[in-house]
Image: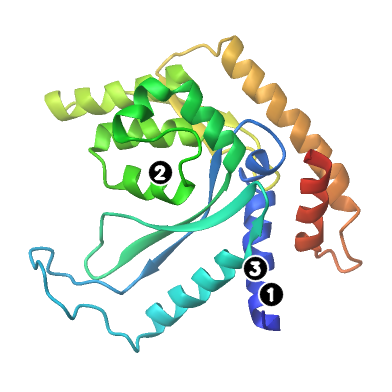
Amino acid sequence: MSQTDKQLADTLIKKVLDNEGLFTVVSGLKPMSSVTELYLKITTADTLRRGDRRITDTTSEDLKKLKRYQQIVNSLNFGDLKFMISPYRITQKDSRPIQITVNRRSLVDSLLKAEQSFFGQFGFVPGTSPEILVNTTEYEHKYNRFRAYGYLFGYPEHAVDFFTVASISNDKTGVFVKRDFFQIPVFSAIRGHFVYAVPQGYKPDEVDSTILNRAKFYLLQYEKVRKKFQRADGSVEYYKLLKKLIKNAA
């Protein structure tokens, strides 16, 4: 990679490690984590058009940007750990959101085994390619999509059930189901990253406490290791840090 591409790759790794992606890299908490999103003008504002051959401007800067990110993401594979790009089904006028995620293949396989009665209906079994799993899920019915993503992002069963059932209720009644949020800290922030919805007034149970305590343990370990890769100017050698974390987790 060029020096500028290496800098961009380092930025993506930073977004992983300083946020919820840490719990995909070093623990069994999250089979998959979001890294970042791109909003690219590569589609059409007319959502009724179907089957047209020419939609995207092949000389556009946004398409060039996507190609660059795809090349970088393809280079960021570390054995069990895999980065990937997933286009969202929805569009916003002439823009399509593109999600970059990181996943741990072994955790995804364990999830597919544990939740085989759900994922099996789509033809997913342990060993299914994460790209096939995620991009098929993205185009599924929204309730199945919510449940699948909930499992992939490491939310407990009760949270996945609540969000899915609440969404069904919202659609049937038009009344928003009130909720609270269970927050799990990451390096960059205490709130707003690794978070899931729970019923309003919900009291955390043993499952929630276990997730929170495990996350805090791994976060503390990360803070210690991270300091060893911090330069004098305060910047961090994130690529080397990631390699070290992967080695320690092996």
**Front of the two marks 1 and 2:** 2
Residue beneath disc 3: 9
The answer to whether the residues at label 3 and label 1 have Cβ atoms under 8 Å apart is yes
Say which element carries label 1.
Answer: helix
Check the image and report above or below for 233 versus 193: below
Residue sitting farthest toward the bottom: 59
Where does the image place residue 225, in percent across and percent down from the top left? 86, 46
Residue beneath disc 1: 6
**Front of the two marks 2 and 3:** 2
Check the image and report above or below for 212 versus 59: above
Closest to the observer, 50 or 211: 50
Q: Is residue 157 left or right of residue 83?
A: left
Q: Amino acid at mark 3?
A: Ala
Q: Earlier in the sequence, mark 1 or mark 2?
A: 1
The quarter of the displayed image where residue 8 is located:
bottom right
The residue under the point 69% across, 34% down is: 27
Closest to the observer, 24 or 233: 24
Residue beneath disc 2: 133
Q: Amino acid at mark 1?
A: Lys
Closest to the observer, 117 or 8: 117
Say which element carries label 2.
Answer: helix
Where does the image place residue 236, in percent across and percent down from the top left? 80, 62
